[in-house]
Amino acid sequence: MNTCLLLRNVLDAALAATDGRALVADDLRRRDAWLGSIVAIGKAAASMLEGALDVMLDAHALLITKDGHVSPALHHRAGVEIIEAGHPLPDARSLDAGRRLLAFIAAAPADRPLLFLLSGGASSLVEVLPEGVALEDWQWVNAWLLGSGLDIHAMNALRKRLSCIKGGRLLQHLGERPAVVLMISDVPGDDPASIGSGLLSPSETPALFEDLPDGLRSLLSAAPPTPALDDSRWASVEARILAGNATALDGAVRAALCLGVPVYRHDDLLRGDAAETGARLAHELIGAPPGVHLWGGETTVNLPEQPGRGGRNQHLALSAALALEGQAGITLLAVGTDGSDGPTQDAGACVDGGTVAAMRAAGIAPEDALRRADSGSALAAVDALIRTEPTGTNVMDVVLAIKIMH
């Protein structure tokens, strides 16, 4: 029995349940006729935009997304302006995307509503920086955040302090235009103010943390104030979350039940250190009843100065593989639902009790790979990586496991 393939099928159902195209089209078909322009930003933006254009056939649109996330059909679609920008680290194109975003809004008809389609990744893909803050400053801040071990809420709270459009500041550029904001959530708790750093969500200016690197504190004081929570203009913004991590797990549960084995959905959201989480899940599985076990969430990795290949899901999977070494009948799959785990083209990995032995036989020291944050290289050597290509969604991570009684 190919247990990795079984888990891939369960994963496919989780991704289908959160597909941006289907979710947006379904929402818009429930509304009255729509005549406005569309702004789509994030790693799921292309899929969400396709859903909008399935309903709003002649709409003008601005799409800002990650490299390689745009379908050929959208590239040839009339009336769609496409900007591909840097992620997970921003680049000069991210600043160009910010300028184009403000220009697109300013050129939109003042008497028609705007449709915003937002998903995770917007924090890096688009920005308008405060005066005096350079691209290199912003890149340094983002690189520090990605290796800091902070969770997504904390990272986005700090990003808001270095932006002229995040933290709800984009509201100031809408003029009198009403807006509908449809979101796919990649944050714990599905807080709109954290999705893409809250471009169009009310947000208080977050306090600065005590333990920050030299120079970061002064940079994070450069942004203009956020619109007040009681600003009357918020009444013209309708926001709705279409899907989140729980939606993906719902889809996974339905598919797992079709396997004819018990299904256990674990509601404790995965967070904290990826290696510690991987080891913990492995030990839980060793003592757990047979069946399919499901978790969701997003862990973190404290990166060394010179990290190797990998991402948080590969890191988690390698740690789990070490704890499962020699255990029969347990397979674990950990993936990022957007199809990219860290700065790689891989979504995650699938491991079992024999993964580490295969690494050692290939001359690889898995403990050393974990220490150097080079899990991707070790997993690639034993063909344990999972690749999905861009999935059309972005709802954090899922960990799926199957335990078979021998």
Image: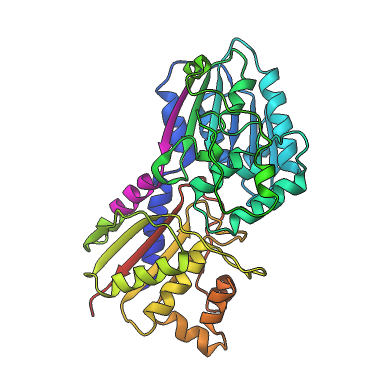
Quadrant of the image containing the N terminus = bottom left
- Hey, which quadrant is residue 82 in on the image? top right
| Residue 206 percent across, percent down from the top left | 53, 38
Q: Is residue 145 above or below residue 324?
A: above
Q: Nearer the viewer, residue 230 or 369?
A: 230
Quadrant of the image containing the C terminus = bottom left
Find out whether residue 168 is within the magenta segment. Answer: no
Magenta-tinted stretch? 238-254
| Coloring applied to the structure | rainbow
Q: Is residue 222 in sight in this rendering?
A: yes
| Residue 105 percent across, percent down from the top left | 66, 22
Residue at position x 56%, y 62% from top? 346
| Residue 363 percent across, percent down from the top left | 57, 89
Q: Nearer the viewer, residue 270 or 221?
A: 221
Q: Is residue 110 left or right of residue 232?
A: right
Q: Nearer the viewer, residue 290 or 60?
A: 290
Q: How many marks?
A: 0
Residue at position x 75%, y 37% from top? 96
Residue at position x 77%, y 43% from top? 134
| Residue 328 percent across, percent down from the top left | 32, 81
Q: Is residue 57 above or below residue 372?
A: above
Find out whether residue 240 is within the magenta segment. Answer: yes
Q: Is residue 70 in sight in this rendering?
A: no
| Residue at the front extreme of this rendering | 210
